[in-house]
């Protein structure tokens, strides 16, 4: 019971600090503002995290996530799912947004690095398996495609958030896959891929609603 | 003569401040650091710019540039040239890098907005002309493609700058066009497009080396 509450408090702290990173940037996010926002004492905060730096590291540790991902007939579908799941979750989860914000902040980047290399590696892994299964066109190079896609995904998120029109990130990312996949996938596989923006919601419901959850 | 020197001094100030924005972020970039970096007096700085805010606005004013662009047989080639030119110039020009840095900084974005809407509009304009000339596939929608590309371009720049490997932005952006264009261009036009990473250098030489420069 007490442990449950401790986990919830830790999450509250991390989410609140992530929101501050998003709103004012790493440098201007202070423990004083966090105290005000959470209503917790400094003692309570420091029980869970040693410092602001510690919180930034915890944010980044949650950035690379396979949550909701499950085995599919095509490895390329799993690669697509990875990006669709993140697009669905990011507008709902300040911690994921903060991980990008910290990555594009010069000071935070110097202190903590980014998780882009991990995302690129994860994508490359899935694309390499897809290639070995004959799902990719001959010239498609897993490392280069994964790198381009991690960049493109990040930038589409940043620009989508900024533009006036009320854009939906899941739709924008699905559109990005539609543009990229004809250059990557063999036609037969391409025809069988599901690029629907709302696909992620279904995947997450499946992984959460079962008797045996598939979280990892 | 005196005016020439004034322009050079203004450029020196703006480039130095842009470098500071890139290195430490908008908030931490101070006039004191600028004084140290340029060796100019506060009086000289304030002669050219009223404030740090004023400098940030001047950086963003230089962000949307058609420099080096010239009329091509295909409008789609001009759209490609726009992205290749920027990819060539950005690593060499701190002011252009700073415009992206300010756009992804929460505080600077709130104060000054970004130039993404202008880039999206410029790309949409070229793509609409390309569509009217029959260069685009029927389903390619200029507004959506331009939006996706501005996002993708931005993110590829941010990620390329960060990854350990010594990556070349022009090559990464050329690779991005290679991935996207088959979904956009009719095959006959696609075959005639020049996506070479070093194309921008040639375009810039042409526009600068002539007796009648084509700067705008």
Image (cartoon, coloured by chain):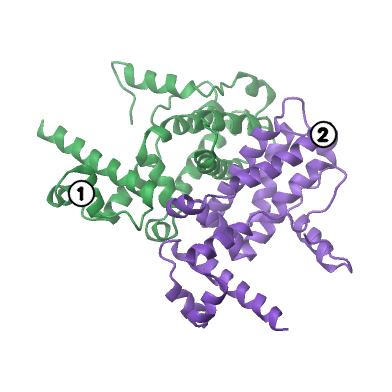
Chain colours: A purple, B green
Check disc 1 and report its element: helix, strand or loop.
helix
Residue B144 visible to the viewer? no
Mark 1 highlights which residue? B35
Tell me what residue is drawn at x 80 percent, y 47 percent: A194
Quarter of the C terminus of chain A within the rendering? bottom right
Mark 1 falls within which chain?
B
User: Quick one: A4 or A127, which is closer to the camera?
Assistant: A4
Vertical arrangement, residue B208 with respect to residue A61, above or below? above
What distance separates the C-alpha of mark 1 from that of mark 2? 57 Å
Question: Foreground mark, 1 or 2?
Answer: 1
Tell me what residue is drawn at x 52 percent, y 32 percent: B166
Give residue A197's position: percent from left, percent from top. 73, 53
Give residue B156's position: percent from left, percent from top. 55, 40
Residue B54 relative to residue B48: left or right: right
Q: Residues within 10 Å of mark 1 (few under 14, many from 20)?
A: some
Mark 2 falls within which chain?
A
Check disc 2 and report its element: helix, strand or loop.
loop
Give residue B155's position: percent from left, percent from top. 54, 44
**Contact, mark 1 vs mark 2 (Cβ under 8 Å):** no
User: Quick one: B182 or A193, which is closer to the camera?
Assistant: A193
- Classify residue B12 by image quadrant: top left
Quarter of the N terminus of chain A within the rendering? bottom right
Residue B15 relative to residue B153: left or right: left
Mark 2 highlights which residue? A135
Residue A197 visible to the viewer? yes
């Amino acid at each position: 019971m007490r442990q449950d509450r401790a986990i919830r408090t830790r999450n509250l702290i991390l989410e609140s600090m992530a929101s501050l990173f998003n709103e004012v940037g790493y440098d201007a996010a202070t423990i004083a503002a966090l105290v005000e926002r959470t209503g917790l004492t400094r003692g309570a905060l420091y029980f869970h995290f040693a410092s602001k730096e510690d919180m930034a590291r915890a944010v980044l540790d949650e950035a690379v996530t396979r949550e909701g991902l499950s085995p599919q007939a095509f490895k390329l579908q799993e690669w697509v799912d990875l990006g669709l799941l993140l697009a669905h979750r990011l507008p709902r989860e300040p911690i994921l947004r903060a991980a990008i914000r910290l990555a594009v902040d010069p000071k935070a980047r110097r202190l903590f690095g980014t998780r882009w290399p991990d995302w690129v590696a994860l994508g490359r892994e899935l694309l390499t398996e897809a290639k070995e299964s004959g799902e990719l066109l001959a010239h498609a190079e897993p490392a280069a495609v994964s790198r381009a896609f991690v960049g493109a995904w990040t930038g589409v998120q940043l620009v989508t958030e900024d533009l006036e029109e009320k854009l939906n990130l899941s739709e924008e990312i699905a559109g990005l896959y539609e543009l990229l996949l004809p250059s990557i996938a063999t036609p037969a596989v391409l025809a069988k891929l599901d690029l629907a923006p709302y696909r992620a919601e279904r995947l997450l419901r499946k992984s959460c609603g079962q008797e045996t959850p598939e979280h990892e």
